[in-house]
Amino acid sequence: MNYDEIFPKIISHAKEYGFIFQSSEIYDGLGAVYDYGQLGVELKRNIMTAWWKAMVQMHENIVGLDSAILMHPTVWKASGHVDAFNDPLIDNKDSKKRYRADVLLEDHIAKFEAKSLKDTQKRARKEGWEAGSEEFEKYLKNNRNAVKAREAQAKYEEALNTEDLTKLRDLIIEFGIVDPVSGSKNWADVRQFNLMFKTQLGATADTALDLYLRPETAQGIFVNYLNVQKTSRMKLPFGIAQIGKAFRNEIVARQFIFRMREFEQMEMQYFIKPGTQMEWFEYWKNYRVKWHKTLGLSEDRLQFHVHEKLAHYADAAEDIQFQFPFGFKELEGIHSRTDFDLNQHQEYSNKKLQFFDPETRESYVPYVLETSVGLDRTFLAHMSNAYQEEEVPNAKGGMETRVVLKLHPLLAPYKVAVFPLVKKDGLQEISRQIIDELKLDYSVMYDEKDSVGRRYRRHDAIGTPYCVTVDYETKDDNCVTIRERDSMEQVRVPISSLREQISKRLSWRELLG
């Protein structure tokens, strides 16, 4: 299945099975804000657990934090967000709609890239080339649409790197980009727009203090750096990890949960001795991409993207990109932030944020190495990676299509589903006893509606890795049938060993060891 065909199916699937709902849907919804349903919240929590175990539990020198969403407004002045947290926006004079200029240009370039891939696939079918072969990759790189994409990308990056707003508008006009709503090319000038949500703290309007909803979670770590270091008696290097909400007033928030106004980040700031940042940069790059692969994201859909233009605070930055249905996009950022953040907060707060090194007997402001991954984007990556449609044999001897979410078993919302073959003759009671035995360790679901075949398909669609069927033979031999989701293989095991059989298949030790 082509990636560009699968995205609408994933969105529909997410709603149909209770993974994600539009926020306030009964009131026609709130744009780019979503609610996680009964299955979505389980998958989301499992991703968080996998991240926390890998980053905190597996590292003696990394501890957790949960900082407040509301922070003193000077925090955002010190961090640069008040003055520099902007997006380039452009209005269409005819439709009166507002768009991000960079997104319009990136979409234009992506269309050429998509055409290049489509041309290459067509040529490959004609010539008999395998996807990924030398001939395939050469044609993909050199066909006319690929060349156009590279030329447009070079012009776009030049304008972006020089922050030339006039040039961005000129490129939109040069490329003939039209308003997606009206088709108009009547564009206004490009302007900068701050993305932070503003709120107020106080009982009356005239005494209220202007605050912001945090646009990132990192600053909560930086302002608590010294508190954590002293109370934990940490030596460098050490890290502080946090999972939390962030808010950005995105004008063009789209692509489902990829870009939202309210989202969650999983971040770790690693405090290190100046001069060691490149060593740790390589370490965390490799560690983080390995984590994504271990949890089942396909290796051929992951790549590193090097930042050509670095943020003012960074001396190295790379993104781990995942091939979403709409192209390779950032999943996680690995950034060497130098000592910028702590120096800024030290200056604005007039509080020393230095580390005393007992070995060298010197004090200095540590450097920071950051790993920051979007929880919602990771969720979407796993949905995109796991969603498959397969032709499989049916009970009548023919073939049928099954939709299956091939999630890593430890991420699946339900780990085990237990079925009585029929709703009588004591099979329900045996099934309930099995659930009571398993539910303290695993999320388990009881399902007695429809035929067993239909129940299998239902649990394939939500990613349940193991289904246990209790039948009439169970009453005689005390055995049940375990059916594995991906292979659809079925094995008969004693009820007494069922918990052990499940635990072998659902081991964090195997995943992270």
Image (cartoon, grey):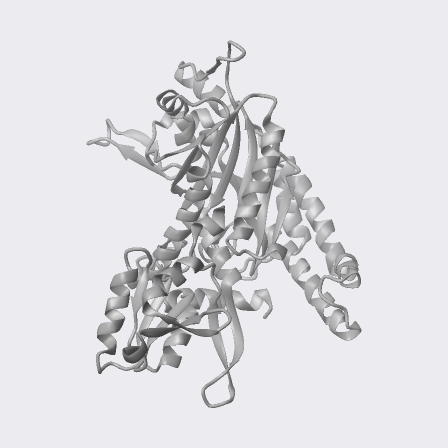
Residue 93 in the image: above or below residue 194: below
Count the marks: 0
Viewer-closest of 472 and 161:
472
Q: Please state the horizontal and vertical placement of residue 295, each as a whole percent of the image.
A: 50, 53
Residue 412 in the image: above or below residue 448: above
Residue 76 in the image: above or below residue 35: above
Residue at horizontal 45 percent and vertical 49 percent from the top:
509
In the picture, measured across the screen, residue 495 lies left or right of residue 340, that is left
Which residue occupies the extreme top position in the image?
361
Residue at horizontal 49 percent and vertical 40 percent from the top:
372
Viewer-closest of 140 and 449:
449
Residue 81 seen in this snapshot: yes
Q: Please state the horizontal and vertical placement of residue 193, each as a whole percent of the image.
A: 48, 39
Viewer-closest of 225 and 409:
409
Q: Please state the horizontal and vertical placement of residue 285, each as a whole percent of the image.
A: 59, 40
Q: Quadrant of residue 483?
A: bottom left
Which residue occupies the extreme bottom position in the image?
396
Q: Please state the horizontal and vertical placement of residue 313, each as a whole percent of the image.
A: 56, 28
Q: Quadrant of residue 69?
A: top left
Query: Quick one: quadrant of the N terminus?
Result: bottom right
Which residue occupies the extreme front position in the image?
477
Residue 315 seen in this snapshot: no
Residue 175 in the image: above or below residue 206: below
In the picture, measured across the screen, residue 301 lies left or right of residue 402, that is right
In the picture, measured across the screen, residue 367 lies left or right of residue 504, that is right
Q: Quadrant of residue 17?
A: bottom left
